[in-house]
Amino acid sequence: MELVKEHTETSKRLLNQHTHGAVVSLQLCVKHQQPMQQVASVRAIENRGLEGDRHAIADSSRQVLLLEQETCIAYDFPIGAIRENITTRGIDLMGLPQATRLQIGDAILETTLACAPCAMVDDVRMGLQEELRGKRGMLARVVRGGEMRVGDEIRVL
């Protein structure tokens, strides 16, 4: 049997996929069309969302929006500008399959679907909505409540 000396495209993708990361920033949407409020910590409520966030709705698949800081940098917009709740670093959120569980602090979130950029994104910069198709972030629901803090590790379970 001959040893394979080169990685296949699949193995390269798996090797490069980041499955650990960190929380860079936490934001809450406290009022419709108002700036996001940055917080140092937040309590995730099981099957509801983030305490104090207007999108905290029972049984919703859109309780929390996670976005990679790398996307903010690549497309040159500030953290919180496209209304994400959790800004991450070092984890390939968009590469995660649906129903992936993430432990962040004491909480566990489960990814539900990729977030499609809405027209509001063009308020940040004209054309950004189109640029962010497939990259706006990952929506999730809270499957176990708990405290989350800026700097917490994010682990794929």
Image (tube, helix red, strand yellow):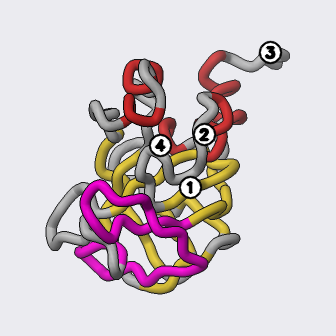
Q: Secondary structure at mark 1?
A: strand
Q: Which residue is mark 2?
A: 72
Using the image, determine if residue 50 lies above or below residue 8. Answer: below
Chain part drawn in magenta: 26-50
- The residue positioned 24% from the left and 75% from the top of the image is 48
Give the residue type that dot 2 points to. Cys
**Who's the residue at 44% across and 53% down the image?**
84
Residue 27 in the image: x percent, y percent?
Answer: 48, 65
CB-based contact (under 8 Å), mark 2 and mark 4: no
User: Which residue does the image show at 67% across and 56% down from the upper left?
Assistant: 21
Q: Nearer the viewer, mark 4 or mark 3?
A: 4
- In the depicted structure, whether residue 117 falls above or below residue 84: above
2 and 1 marks in contact (CB < 8 Å): yes
| Mark 3 or mark 2, whichever is nearer to me | 2
Number of residues whose C-alpha sits closer than 10 Å to that of mark 4, classed few (under 14), some (14–19) or many (20 or more): some
Question: Disc 2 versus disc 1: distance between alpha carbons?
Answer: 9 Å
